[in-house]
Image (cartoon, rainbow, N blue to C red):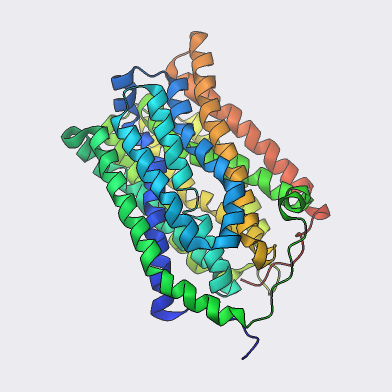
Amino acid sequence: MSDAPHYLQGRLGMRVVLVFAAAYFLSYAFRAINAVIAPALMADLQLSNADLGLLSSAYFVGFACLQLPLGVWLDKYGPRRTESALLAFAALGAAIFASSDTLAGLWLGRALIGIGVSACLMAPLKAYRVWYPPERQSQLASWMLVFGTCGALATTVPVAMLLPVIGWRGVFWAMAAMIILAATLLFLRLKPVEKDMLQQQSSMPAPPAAPGGYRAIFADPYFRRMALLSGVYQGGFMAIQTLWAGPWMVNVLGLSVDETSRVLFLFNLFLMLSYVGLSWWAPRYVSYGGRPGIPALRVVTYGLALSMLIQLAMLLFPYTWAWVFWLIFALVVTVTTLAQTHVSLSFPSSQAGRANSAFNLTLFIGAFGLQWGMGLLIDVFMSQGWSQSLAIRMSWAVYLLLQLSALIFFVSTGSRVAPFTEKPASA
C-alpha cells in the first residue's frame, strides 16, 4: 500500500460537498433571517433594540458554547455522526421559536438553533482537511461560504414574500422540517463514504500527535493574533449581516421594508459572487507558505483596510443611494476566509477539528458581543435624545475604531509570530 494519502475526487467528492452544503445553507439561513423578520418581531412582542440584539445573539451564544467540545467530537467521532446528531437540536430550537410568545422562549429556541447548527461549517472543514488535498482547502472553504450565502439570499426577498402569507412562525416551522431532512441526508449518504475513507487511511502512517490540545492552541501567539482578527472582523461582519444591516437600511438610508429586502438580496448575491471569485483566484495566486504567490495574510491585511474605508464612506454618506456601498463592501470582506484556511493548514490534520473550532469560537464570541453591544449602544445614544439614525451610525463608528485598533495590532505583531507546529501546506 502506498504511503500517499487517499483523497476524494470526481463525482464522489462533489457529492460529499453538496451534502455538507445543504446543511450549511440552512445554518446560514437561520443565522441571517432575523435581519428580515426584525420589524415583525419587534411589533409582535414590543421588543427594544437591546432586546432584539440580545435575542439575535442567542444564536451565537449557543453556537459558541459548543465550539470547544465540538472540536473534540469531530476529531474523535468524525464529521458525519457529530453534525447529524447536533442538527436535531436545531430542529427542536426552530419549533420552540415558532411556538413561543415570550422573549425568554424565543431566546431559548434561538440558542438551541445555534447549538444545533454549530457543526455545519466545522464538520465539513474537518472532513475536507482529511479527505481532500491541501491545495483544495481554500477553494472548498470558499464554496461552503457560497452555499451559506445562498442561504442568506433565501432569507431576503423569498422570506419577505412569505411573511404576509404564513408569518414568521410559519417560516420557522418550515425550516424545522428542512433541517430534519438535511440531518437524515447527511447521516445516510455520507456513511459509505466515511467507511471507505477510514479503510483507505487506516493503512497510512499516523499523523503527528497534537501536543497539548486546546491549551497549546490558545497559548500560541500565532493563534491569538489570528483569533483577534476573527472576533473583530468576521464576528463583526456576521453581527451586521445577520441583524443590523436591516435596521441600517430602514432607519439610516430611509428605505422601506420591501426595498430593504431587495437591497439585502443584492448584498448577499454580491457576497456569493465574491466567494465564487475567491474560490477560483485563491488557489492560483495566494500562497500559504509552500509555493510562490501572494502571502495569504498580506491579502487579508489589504482587504480589511479597504473594507474599513468602505465602511467609513457608509458612515459619511447616509443617503438613499448609499446602499451601493454595501455591494462594494460585500466584494471586499470575503478575504477573511483566507485567514480561516491559514489557521486550518497551520495545525496537524489530527487536530484540525480542535483548531478550526477554537478559531470559530472567537468568531462567534465576537459576533455575540458586537451584535448585542451595538444594540446597547443604540439605546444609550437614543436615551440621550439622539435620533435612531444617528444612534445607529455612532454605534457603527465605535465599531470602526475597534477594527482600526485590531488591524494595527495584527500588522505590528506580524514579524514576531509564526504558525504553531506545521508550516502551512501549499494551496
The front one of 328 and 111 is: 111
* Residue 133 as seen in the image, left or right of residue 301: left
The residue drawn where x is 38% and y is 19% is 47
The quarter of the rendered structure image containing the C terminus is: bottom right
Q: Is residue 72 visible?
A: yes
Query: Percent position (x, y) of residue 360?
Result: 58, 48
Query: Percent position (x, y) of residue 210?
Result: 73, 63
The front one of 247 and 96 is: 96
Q: Is residue 270 visible?
A: no
The residue drawn where x is 30% and y is 20% is 43
* Residue 216 as seen in the image, left or right of residue 9: right
Query: Percent position (x, y) of residue 20?
Result: 42, 61
Question: Taking 218 as reference, is 393 above or below it?
Answer: above
Q: In the rendered image, which quarter is residue 276 located in?
A: bottom left
The front one of 97 and 332 is: 97
The quarter of the rendered structure image containing the N terminus is: bottom right
Query: Percent position (x, y) of residue 50?
Result: 47, 21
Question: Taking 121 as reference, is 105 above or below it?
Answer: above
Question: Taking 19 as reference, is 223 above or below it?
Answer: above
Question: Taking 77 as reference, is 324 above or below it?
Answer: above
The residue drawn where x is 32% and y is 27% is 100
* Residue 287 as seen in the image, left or right of residue 390: right
